[in-house]
Image (cartoon, grey):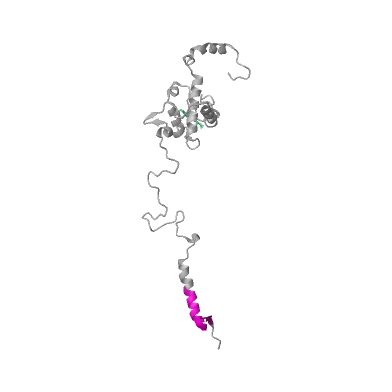
Amino acid sequence: MIPLGLPGPRGGTIPLGRTLIGLALVAVTSAACRQDMHDQPKMKPLRGSGFFADRRSARPLVPGTVARGTLREDNAYYTGRAGNEFLASVPLPLDGALLARGREQFEVFCSPCHGRTGRGDGMVVQRGFKKPPSYHIERLRQAPVGYFYDVMTNGFGAMSDYAGQIPVKERWAIAAYVRALQLSQYAPVTDVPAERRADLDRSLAAPPPEGSHR
Ligand code: HEC
């Protein structure tokens, strides 16, 4: 009879039965140690868990958690208020670029209702939406610029807020432009430097130049 088995040490053979048992043992023990990344202990989104009292594997955020890059330390800039008072000036360098951007955004987001001059006669209003007050009424002329930022941020009466559509900086740009619009419709002559007032009289007397919208 030819003995079945593997060649053993010293020229003998290891019987097949014992070989198989040995191999099976190696297979079983090494499988237990093997854990690849595709098979790691993890919780899938919304999977239940017996570990926590609320039986949810996803843990709620610790109160006060702030996502990286979204710490809004400058409260006045983000709310338009210092304490309970609305800011009286735009908390950004006020220059031509900011006003130009404000105008562009105003014409996109606000003019459909408020009209391009802020008189509350935009197309949406002409088609039946509630007519907003003109920006040129005394109450809104006196309102601090932070108030306009606040109306955009939180909405006002029938007007919904624009916080989701218009980023903070652009809201300030619009608020600055609304202020400029107000000045354009109501600037006392004393705002004009004395030495330029004569120019004003001359331009009022002259016919408007070709293509002007006066
Ligand atoms: C869909 C139309 C609509 C759009 C767009 C709109 N508004 Fe208004 N807004 C209104 C209406 C209507 C009111 C009056 C709400 C009321 O009295 O219930 C109003 C009121 C206001 C007021 C006056 C609040 C007061 O004290 O009387 C301000 C300021 C204002 N809007 C600013 C803006 C600015 C800035 C934008 C653009 C970012 C804008 N609105 C876009 C409809 C609109």
Confirm whether residue 160 shows in the render.
Answer: no
Q: Quadrant of the C terminus?
A: top right
Range covered by the magenta-colored residues: 5-25
Q: Quadrant of the N terminus?
A: bottom right
The residue shown at (48%, 74%) is 24
**In the figure, residue 46 lies in which quadrant?**
bottom left
Assess whether residue 109 is covered by the magenta stretch.
no
Main SS, magenta region, reads helix
Q: Position of residue 205 (x, y in %)?
A: 57, 11
Confirm whether residue 185 shows in the render.
Answer: yes
Name, please, the residue furthest toward the right.
Answer: 210
Residue closest to the eye, 158 or 213 = 213
Q: Position of residue 27 (x, y in %)?
A: 49, 71
Vertical relation: 73 (above or below) 53: above
Q: Position of residue 7 (x, y in %)?
A: 53, 81
Q: Position of residue 112 (x, y in %)?
A: 54, 30
The residue shown at (45%, 22%) is 141
The reply, left or right, for residue 73 in relation to residue 7 is left
Residue closest to the eye, 29 or 86 = 29
Vertical relation: 101 (above or below) 56: above
**In the figure, residue 82 lies in which quadrant?**
top left
